[in-house]
Amino acid sequence: MIERAGRAGRESARHWRYPRLPGVDLLRARYIHKSFARHTHESFVIAAVTAGVEEFHHRGDIVRVGPGGLALVNPDTPHTGHAGAPGGWTYGVLYPSAALVAAVAAETTALRGAAGFRTPGVHDPEAARLVTEVLRAAEEDDALAADSLLRVVVARLLRDHGAALPARTPPAAGARGAARARAILEERMADPPTLAALAAELGTGPFALLRAFRAAYGMPPHTWLTDARVRRARHLLDAGSTPADTAAAVGFTDQSHLSRHFARIVGVPPGAYRKERAATRALQP
């Protein structure tokens, strides 16, 4: 748990895993001045607001979620997050894996293809209550309740707010170039090329690459690279790497550089994140 005093109160956040609920990350937080950078998740995001208002950008829209509402974000979908009212917001968040959501969809819905959410913000007080009950059950080490309630809330949200996600279409030439640029940045994360060098390697111009990359991934290459670095940093911290070693491995200049970007994407500093992961590993049989 991290806590930080603010001008209008105290922020707090805990980002953790419950070892008896595999495939799900958990977050409880109160944010006042927090501003999440544009980022993505490998998992789904199911965030139940219990006080205040969260506001976030999602596919060109501004979404506001207040008490009794949920923010629903599909994997690999760029979005932000910040206070939508004075005093910030308080919420509980479930991050179920795509595999878990797919399993629930296959058992409880008639959706065909990859299942996801059709709208990023909904008012559903009962589903929001269930999210908080999942978190409470995990905190109380009630594995049966946590797993049962998780599946119930995912099934409910898919039933009421779910849809089959659009099938991937063959990429156009610009999208193919963006995919190649993404692969290069992934491979050379610790020492990436400049935009001009990357475009030259792909046989295109810098502005053409910028347009194609943004169209394909919802953000420019440098923003995507920061997001990818933090995503890889999470995996390294999960495995026990220190924040300093992790920063060097993913290409941040130092630990403070990692900490700044990590907190703006994950919601907690890398040290607090690693401490929770270490505690989870210690509880595993």
Image (tube, helix red, strand yellow):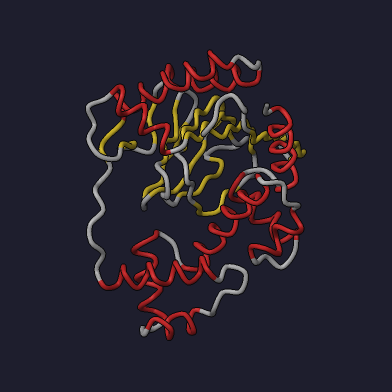
Q: Is residue 52 left or right of residue 282?
A: left
Q: How many circles with numbers are drawn on the protein?
A: 0
As drawn, the residue found furthest toward the front would be 285
Who's the residue at 58% across and 50% down the image? 265
Q: Residue at x 63, y 62 (%)?
A: 250
* Residue in the image at 30% along x and 22% along y: 108
The image quadrant where one finds the C terminus is top right
- Image height check: is 165 above or below 171? above
Where does residue 132 sit, x and y in percent of width and height?
A: 54, 21
Question: Is the residue 132 above or below the residue 196 in the image?
Answer: above
Q: Tell me where residue 228 sits by quadrant.
A: bottom right
At 47% from the left edge and 68% from the top edge, which residue is drawn?
A: 221
Nearest the viewer among 99 and 273 is 99
Snapshot quadrant of residue 170: bottom left
Where is 137 relative to 103, above or below?
above
x, y (%) of residue 109? 26, 25
The x and y percentages for residue 89 are 58, 33
Return the x and y of residue 29 as percentages of the image width and height.
Answer: 63, 33
Q: The N terminus is located in which quarter?
A: top right
Please indicate whether residue 101 sits to the left or right of residue 109 in the image: right
Q: In the image, is residue 141 above or below residue 278?
A: above
